[in-house]
Image: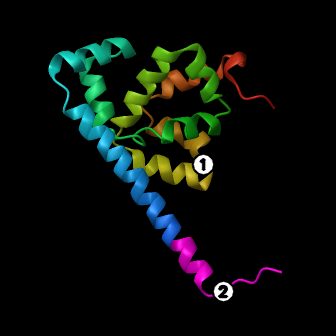
Amino acid sequence: MMTHTATDPIRHALSTILGWFAREWEAKSQSDLMKALDQQELEQIAEDCGISRGQLLAFIEAGPHGADEMPRMMRALNIDPIEVEFRMLRLYRDMQLTCITCGAKAQCRKDLAEGHAATEFQHYCGNIDTLNALRARPEMLLEA
C-alpha cells in the first residue's frame, strides 16, 4: 500500500515548474534560432510555408501559443480545426495570422472561458467572415 507524504505536493509543484521552464526555454530557443537566420533563409522558410516573410516574422514573434485562441474559437463554433488545417492549410495560416495580431485577445479568452464565444465573437473577431463561411460547410463541422 502506497502512502502519500507531505513531499508529494512539493514534488508535483516542482515537476510542474520544471516542465514550464523546459517548455518556455525550448520555445525561446526556437524563437532565437529563427531570429538569427539571415534574410535569404527567412525568405526561403516563408516560401516553403506558403506565407510572406512578414507573416513568418509575426509568427516567430508571437511564439508557439500566439494563436491558441483560434482552434478553441473554432471548436466553440462547432468547426473542426483539424479538418480545416488539413483541407485548407493556407486559409488556416491566414486565420492564425489574424488571430496572432488581434487586439481583442482578452475579450476572446474571457468569452471562451465563460462559454459565450459562439454568441459574442462577431463583436470583435477578425476572422468572423471566414468562421461564418466555414460554419456553412458541413464537411468542416465537428461530428455530433
* Foreground pick, 28 / 63: 28
Residue 5 got which mark? 2
| Residue 144 position by quadrant | top right
Looking at the image, is 71 positioned above or below residue 133?
below
Residue at horizontal 26%, vertical 35%? 33
Looking at the image, is 124 positioned above or below residue 93?
below
Q: Secondary structure at mark 1?
A: loop
Counting from the top left corner in percent of width and height, residue 34 is at: 26, 32
If you read the primary sequence from the N terminus, does the residue marked by circle 2 or circle 1 appear first? 2
Q: Is residue 87 left or right of residue 37?
A: right
Q: Which portion, as a residue range, is magenta?
A: 1-13
Counting from the top left corner in percent of width and height, residue 40 is at: 18, 15
Q: Residues within 10 Å of mark 2 (few under 14, many from 20)?
A: few
Q: Nearer the viewer, mark 2 or mark 1?
A: 2
Asked if residue 12 lies in the magenta stretch, the reply is: yes
Q: Residues within 10 Å of mark 1 (few under 14, many from 20)?
A: some
| Residue 132 position by quadrant | top right
Q: Secondary structure at mark 2?
A: loop
Counting from the top left corner in percent of width and height, residue 76 is at: 63, 39
Q: Is residue 54 left or right of residue 11?
A: left
Asked if residue 99 lies in the magenta stretch, the reply is: no
* Foreground pick, 142 / 27: 27
Q: Is residue 14 visible?
A: yes
The amino acid marked with disc number 2 is Thr
Q: Which residue is mark 1?
A: 116
